[in-house]
Image (cartoon, helix red, strand yellow):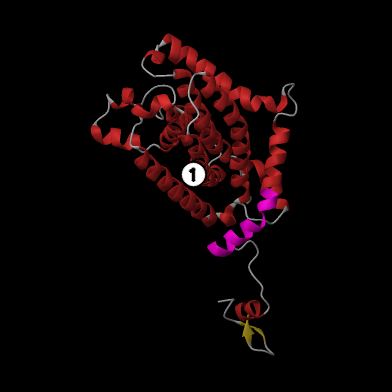
Amino acid sequence: MANTAVADPESGLTRAQLAQRYGLRVAGERPALGEYARRLWAYRHFMTAYSRAKVASSLSNTQLGQLWQVLTPLTNAAVYFLIFGLILAQSRSVPNFIAYLCTGVFVFIFTQTAATNGVSAITGNLGLIRALQFPRAALPITVTLVQLQQLLMSMVVLAAIVLITGEPITLRWVLIVPMLLLQTIFNVGLSMVMARLGSKAADLKQVMPFVMRTWLYASGVLYPVALIREHLPSWAANILEWNPPLVFIELARYALLESHQANLISSPLKLWAMGLLWAIVMGVGGFVYFWRGEKEYGRG
């Protein structure tokens, strides 16, 4: 009723009409999706600079510094190799198990950390959100950019491992670039979904380690997925084949490991189609889902 009442007797205009005449908007109003995307693009330099600062400061208090970006996945791979490669003897059934395992670990950690850190993208930056006006989607995007920079450093080490363990350099190696592009788009959308969920449920951060550990075991990182599929009904095995990290891991192994070509879970064409579909669905869907909650972030 207040908006329909005459606010200016001289002009006879209501409050809504006056606001429209002078270009006034409700404070904190959510912009249209297209306008939101344009504003976000305008902050691209902020996101790249902020992500670089995050990478530089994340391990600045340790003696080895940013070297831990490579040592952490290598240490994880070493532990998994001890358990699954030596103790459980998976290395006997998988050609070049070391390169197979390291590829899976490095690629999975990229998605794992994007999801886990995305949960606190909003809650961990409340001071910045309340002090400055900017598209909040910049924060989960920055989370993914930080992890991407760390992954690129790790990929150099992975390439060395692959070569040392006897894999040849082939033209398929160039496919690692579009594969990482698709995974990055997927991770950005996933990080946005987790950021909005994390802003609503503070306890989600405590649950994430259990979720990610389950996801790890279902993603063919440590052993062939065929071992799991043997104990699943056909419908569950088909769903497992569409597991996003598994798709991206298989694409990476297809690009880098000549020894794995005969053991892919699907044809390369189907893997690329699934990877593209996941990137589009999660990238677009995650962006829209996060945008719909724009007015909620930083309040309370």
Q: Which part of the image, by quadrant, shows the N terminus?
A: bottom right
Residue type highlighted by circle 1:
Leu
Q: Quadrant of residue 191?
A: top right
| Residue drawn at point x = 58 percent, y = 37 percent | 117
In the image, the segment drawn in magenta is 31-47
Q: Residue at x 63, y 37 (%)?
A: 149
The residue located at (73%, 23%) in the rendering is 62
Q: Look at mark 1 in the image and give the residue it sits on.
A: 182
Overall secondary structure of the magenta section: helix
Viewer-proximal residue, 30 or 135?
135
How many residues crowd around disc 1 within 10 Å: few (fewer than 14), some, or many (20 or more)? many
x and y percentages locating residue 248 in the rendered image: 45, 36
147 or 285, nearer to the observer: 147
* Residue 6 image-quadrant placement: bottom right
> Circle 1 — which element?
helix
Q: Is residue 199 above or below residue 109?
A: below
| Residue 197 colored in magenta in the image | no
- Give the camera-side residue of 18 and 106: 106
Name the residue: 43% across, 50% down. Answer: 281
Kindly tell me whether residue 22 is visible in this rendering: yes
Residue 163's place in the image compared with 255, above or below, is above
**Magenta segment includes 32:** yes
